[in-house]
């Protein structure tokens, strides 16, 4: 049996949506059963992947660079563990969590774009597979092969159990997935469908980038609006404080004006009383002078 041929067929099968797997597997078996019966038996024996495994396989096909980054983080973690570098371990651990979370979100988005909403349970299995790929290099290689049949888990001790998790063993040499993508067996309809899907995916990626940028702009605008709202509230409070102070000062001014008017009135009354007193004093002085003159006159006549 041609192992490379089986890898190529498996690569093709584990890239189709779950609901199409059985029909695609049967069609692949029928294509080879007359030429290689052992290969046909091996093809029909390929297990249908779980939903979580299909999501992981989809992620590998659509985001190979990010999956490679995940494996690189795992390698750096292993090197740091050997060197017993605590700070670097913590930093890489944070990076691992960020990469795993980001890839898990991407995987859910890719599955949704294919018409498959991922449940919480399936999402947890996808994340478990990504974490296992970080911890164990063999698990990382199995994930990167894109032919998982079931999700991977890491118990915390020893290597990840890969038994039954791969449709076909990972072999050295060029990746069968890349060979399958370039295989001449792809007919015109398949090619057009793939090209349309790739074009749709590029448009989706651009739309997501635009959405992220728009989200950032909206976030900044919301922050600016909130700051402006706070400034407005502060200005309104300041205006109310000044209005109350102006009312207070106006009241004080009115009281001062009343008191000044009362003082003017009292001063005028006092001035009038003074003038009257001056006149009375002058009259009294005149009477006194006349009386004194009369006394003098009478005294002089008596002598």
Image: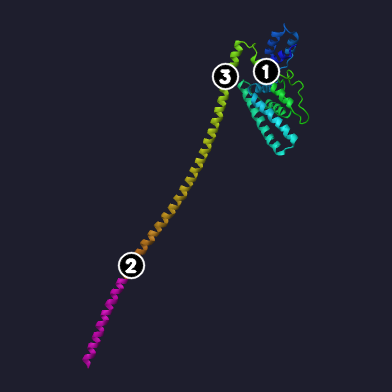
* Main secondary structure along the magenta-highlighted residues: helix
The quarter of the image holding the N terminus is top right
Indicate the position of residue 41 as horizontal and vertical percent values. 75, 11
User: Can you tell which of label 2 and label 1 is closer to the viewer?
Assistant: 1
| Rendered image: mark on residue 177 | 1
Indicate the position of residue 29 as horizontal and vertical percent values. 71, 10
In the rendered image, the residue lying farthest to the bottom is: 303
- The span shown in magenta is 274-303
Residue 302 or 164: which is nearer the viewer? 164
Magenta segment includes 41:
no
**Image height check: is 224 above or below 249?**
above
Instruction: Tell me what residue is drawn at x 59 percent, y 18 percent.
Output: 197
Spatial CA distance of label 3 from label 1 is 20 Å
Magenta segment includes 295:
yes
Indicate the position of residue 30 as horizontal and vertical percent values. 70, 8
In the rendered image, the residue lying farthest to the right is: 158
Categorize mark 3 by other alpha carbons within 10 Å: few (<14), some (14-19), many (20+).
few
Tell me if I can see residue 14 in this picture: no
Residue occupied by mark 3: 199
| Rendered image: mark on residue 121 | none
Which mark sits nearer the N-terminus, 3 or 2? 3
Tell me if I can see residue 240 in this picture: yes
Categorize mark 2 by other alpha carbons within 10 Å: few (<14), some (14-19), many (20+).
few
Residue occupied by mark 2: 269
């Amino acid at each position: 049996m041609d192992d490379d041929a089986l890898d190529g067929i498996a690569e093709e099968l584990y890239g189709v949506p779950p609901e199409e797997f059985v029909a695609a597997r049967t069609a692949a078996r029928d294509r080879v059963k007359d030429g290689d019966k052992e290969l046909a038996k091996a093809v029909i024996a390929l297990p249908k992947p779980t939903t979580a495994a299909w999501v992981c396989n989809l992620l590998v096909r659509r985001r190979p660079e990010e999956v490679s980054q995940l494996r690189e983080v795992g390698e750096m973690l292993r090197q740091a563990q050997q060197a017993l570098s605590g700070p670097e371990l913590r930093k890489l651990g944070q990076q691992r969590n960020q990469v795993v979370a980001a890839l898990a979100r991407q995987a859910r988005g890719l599955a949704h774009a294919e018409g498959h909403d991922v449940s919480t349970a399936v999402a947890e299995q996808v994340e478990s597979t990504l974490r296992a790929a970080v911890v164990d290099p063999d698990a990382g290689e199995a994930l990167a092969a894109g032919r998982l049949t079931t999700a991977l888990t890491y118990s915390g001790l020893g290597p990840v159990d890969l038994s039954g998790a791969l449709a076909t063993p990972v072999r050295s040499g060029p990746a069968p997935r890349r060979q399958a993508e370039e295989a001449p067996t792809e007919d015109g309809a398949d090619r057009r469908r793939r090209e349309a899907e790739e074009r749709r995916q590029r448009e989706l990626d651009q739309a997501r980038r635009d959405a992220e940028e728009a989200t950032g702009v909206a976030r900044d605008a919301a922050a600016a609006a909130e700051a402006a709202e706070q400034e407005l509230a502060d200005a309104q409070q300041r205006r109310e404080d000044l209005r109350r102070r102006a009312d207070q000062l106006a009241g004080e001014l009115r009281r001062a004006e009343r008191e000044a008017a009362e003082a003017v009135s009292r001063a005028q009354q006092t001035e009038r009383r003074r003038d009257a007193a001056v006149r009375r004093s002058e009259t009294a002085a005149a009477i006194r002078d006349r009386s004194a003159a009369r006394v003098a006159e009478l005294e002089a006549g008596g002598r």
